[in-house]
Image (cartoon, helix red, strand yellow):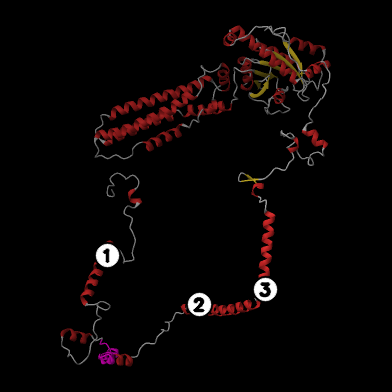
């Protein structure tokens, strides 16, 4: 079998050039500099030329390998290709592809040789450009050939998968005589059937099983009675199938003449193509007998039908009366055609000696059966052969019969245990014990469960009696008092929680828990412990700061008298620290830390931003020629 559907799509010439050039750009290096060694530059451009030539070579070689060679395939497919499209045109298109492949190889070889003597990057680049340009120009000249081959590929993909060597039945005759209806009956094919001529315009194939063997049935387009050179391509496909396929021929004749052609014209067609039926089983199907019987034919028409039995091949012609509308005679004609073809195939294998090859692999015994051991045939079979009805002794009723007896569908329930094989048939309908964790549920049942239940009930009764003897009212009263105290405590807790929540939402300064001490109290406290409390009074007095620039300059220059006015001192840096030296150490560390932050570009101690040391937009992709500032 030829795999015409697996031929890959052939792109147009311009699209093929774009495919190869883009592939060359993607699959080869793209960066070269004048500073490289000249050998490296030559290899860079030679690689591009060779890769482009290899890509074209692969494309053209695949086209030449996948398309069938007309001289090597079966004559049926060769003539079918010649009918559908000119074989000379097909060979010419493949020859142009092969010639273009050789031209591309020669261009690549020539320019690679010249690149070996180039002494600069510019010369290598121009040679590469010229090589790829000449290759593309030669490929673009294949526009017509590639377009034709793409049409041929599409047509080959639509051809039916016909096996020329298998068992085949061919249906032929005038248009609209019932060939497609016959095929739809005997096979699962769904061929279009219409009440006008030339509904079938190409070969249709269907398959069937006969005697456990697969057969193929070919429905051919209708043939008209005119010279061979006047027939069109649709009719020539049927002639090609009849000429080259070793099959049984079923020639259809419409005796009712509803097809639009009279009986004499149909018989004339039979005699004109009679040489194609030589050495093949031939059946003449007298179709549409439901519209007109054979007995209704005139003497002249019957004589025309009898003339069809005279075939030069010497084989016997069989007539069958059929009606595809009522499906009468269809199976008989099919069976006879299959039997005749099988007999003919067996005769050919015996004549050619193919049967001897299989016979040498088999061992056939010729021993006759002994007379003292007659064949053992059951009595029921003997009674059936004699026409007697075997007695239904002990016959088991079917499940369908039991269902009808016991109420029918929807009422009857299938008895799954009816055919169970047990030691005791009485066990069939016993209740199946439930199993849990590998144990029967009965294993978990305590045999003394009733006695233990009585003891528990007795103990519960004693407990109830004891509770009734106690002083329940006092206990309940104490519990209620305790509950009231607890409710009051919980209420206070909830109130405090609410007050805290309300106090937190205020924006003002909260009132301190302890009032601040007054200056008099602090002074008395210091005097009591032996310290001078007047300093506190002088420190707490409000003193007006002098904002005059002149007074500040006088203070700095020492011109102002010491006792005239008290100036405010700068705030000491040692507040909270034991001494001024410790304050200087802390200030020194703070300044050092700030210098480190400023060096790293941080805004402060809380700045944890980490910069991207290698931004992707600056370090990814290929660099252009001369752009080395970002390496």
Between discs 2 and 1, the one toward the N terminus: 2
Q: Which numbered tag is attached to residue 469?
A: 3
Instruction: Work out whether 418 lies above or below 553.
Output: above
Which stretch is magenta? 526-546
Which element type, helix, strand or loop, lies under badge 1?
helix
Q: How many labels does the image show?
A: 3
37 on left or right of 279: left
Which element type, helix, strand or loop, lies under badge 3?
helix
Q: Which numbered tag is attached to residue 138?
A: none
Whole-percent x and y of residue 104? 38, 27
What residue is disc 1 on? Answer: 598
Whole-percent x and y of residue 450? 70, 55
Magenta highlight on residue 228? no
Of the two numbered discs 3 and 2 in the rendering, the one whose residue sits closer to the viewer: 3
Q: In which quarter of the image is residue 212?
A: top right
Instruction: Work out whether 192 lies above or below 300.
Output: below
274 on left or right of 396: left
211 on left or right of 603: right
What residue is disc 2 on? Answer: 497
Q: In which quarter of the image is residue 529?
A: bottom left
User: Pointer 2: residues within 10 angstroms few (<14), some, or many (20+)?
Assistant: few
Magenta highlight on residue 532? yes
- Res 219 visible: no
Between discs 1 and 3, the one toward the N terminus: 3
Between discs 3 and 2, the one toward the N terminus: 3
The answer for how far apart the CA atoms under marks 2 and 1 are is 48 Å
Q: Which residue shows up at 60% across the image and 46% down it?
A: 437
Instruction: Work out whether 541 lies above or below 285.
Output: below
What is the quadrant of the N terminus in the image?
A: top right
Of the two numbered discs 1 and 3 in the rendering, the one whose residue sits closer to the viewer: 3
Which element type, helix, strand or loop, lies under badge 2?
helix
């Amino acid at each position: 079998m030829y795999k015409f559907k697996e031929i890959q799509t052939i792109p147009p010439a311009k699209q093929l050039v774009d495919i190869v050039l883009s592939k060359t750009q993607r699959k080869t290096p793209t960066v070269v500099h004048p500073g490289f060694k000249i050998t490296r530059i030559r290899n860079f451009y030679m690689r591009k030329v060779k890769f482009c030539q290899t890509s074209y070579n692969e494309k053209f070689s695949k086209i030449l390998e996948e398309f069938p060679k007309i001289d090597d395939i079966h004559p049926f497919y060769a003539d079918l290709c010649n009918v559908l499209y000119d074989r000379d045109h097909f060979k010419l298109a493949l020859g142009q592809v092969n010639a273009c492949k050789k031209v591309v190889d020669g261009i690549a070889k020539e320019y690679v040789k010249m690149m070996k003597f180039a002494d600069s990057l510019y010369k290598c680049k121009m040679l590469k450009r010229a090589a790829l340009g000449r290759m593309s120009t030669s490929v673009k000249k294949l526009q017509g050939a590639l377009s034709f081959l793409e049409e041929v590929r599409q047509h080959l993909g639509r051809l039916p998968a016909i096996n020329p060597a298998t068992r085949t039945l061919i249906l032929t005759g005038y248009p609209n005589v019932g060939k497609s209806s016959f095929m739809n009956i005997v096979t699962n094919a769904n061929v279009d059937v219409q009440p006008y001529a030339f509904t079938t315009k190409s070969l249709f194939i269907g398959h069937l099983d006969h005697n456990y063997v697969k057969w193929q049935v070919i429905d051919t387009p209708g043939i008209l009675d005119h010279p061979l050179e006047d027939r069109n391509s649709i009719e020539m496909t049927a002639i090609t199938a009849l000429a080259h396929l070793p099959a049984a021929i079923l020639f259809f004749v419409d005796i009712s003449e509803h097809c639009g052609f009279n009986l004499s014209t149909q018989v004339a067609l039979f005699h004109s193509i009679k040489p194609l039926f030589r050495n093949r089983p031939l059946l003449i199907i007298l179709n549409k007998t439901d519209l007109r019987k054979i007995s209704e034919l005139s003497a002249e028409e019957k004589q025309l039908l009898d003339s069809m039995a005279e075939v030069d091949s010497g084989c016997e012609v069989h007539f069958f009366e059929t009606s595809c509308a009522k499906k009468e005679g269809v199976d008989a004609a099919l069976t006879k055609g299959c039997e005749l073809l099988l007999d003919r195939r067996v005769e050919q294998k015996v004549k050619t000696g193919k049967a001897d090859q299989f016979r040498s692999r088999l061992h056939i015994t010729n021993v006759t059966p002994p007379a003292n051991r007659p064949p053992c045939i059951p009595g029921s079979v003997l009674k059936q052969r004699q026409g007697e009805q075997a007695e239904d002794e002990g016959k088991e009723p079917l499940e369908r019969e039991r269902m009808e007896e016991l109420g029918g569908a929807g009422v009857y329930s299938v008895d799954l245990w009816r055919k169970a094989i047990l030691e005791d048939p009485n066990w069939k309908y016993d209740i199946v014990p439930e199993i849990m964790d590998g144990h029967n549920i009965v294993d978990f049942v305590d045999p003394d469960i009733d006695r233990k239940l009585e003891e528990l009930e007795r103990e519960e009764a004693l407990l109830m009696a004891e509770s009734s003897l106690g002083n329940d009212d006092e206990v309940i009263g104490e519990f209620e008092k305790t509950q009231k105290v607890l409710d009051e405590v919980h209420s206070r807790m909830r109130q405090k929680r609410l007050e805290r929540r309300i106090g937190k939402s205020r924006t003002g300064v909260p009132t301190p828990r302890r009032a601040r001490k007054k200056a008099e109290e602090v002074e008395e406290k210091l005097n009591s412990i032996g310290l001078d409390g007047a300093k506190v009074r002088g420190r707490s007095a409000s003193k007006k700061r002098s904002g005059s620039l002149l007074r500040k300059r006088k203070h700095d220059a020492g011109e102002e008298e010491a006792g005239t006015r008290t100036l405010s001192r700068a705030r000491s840096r040692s507040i909270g620290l034991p001494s001024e030296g410790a304050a200087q150490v802390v200030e020194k560390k703070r300044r050092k830390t700030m210098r480190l932050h400023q060096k790293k570009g941080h805004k402060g101690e809380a700045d944890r931003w980490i910069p991207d040391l290698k931004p992707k937009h600056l370090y990814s992709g290929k660099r252009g020629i001369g752009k080395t500032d970002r390496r």
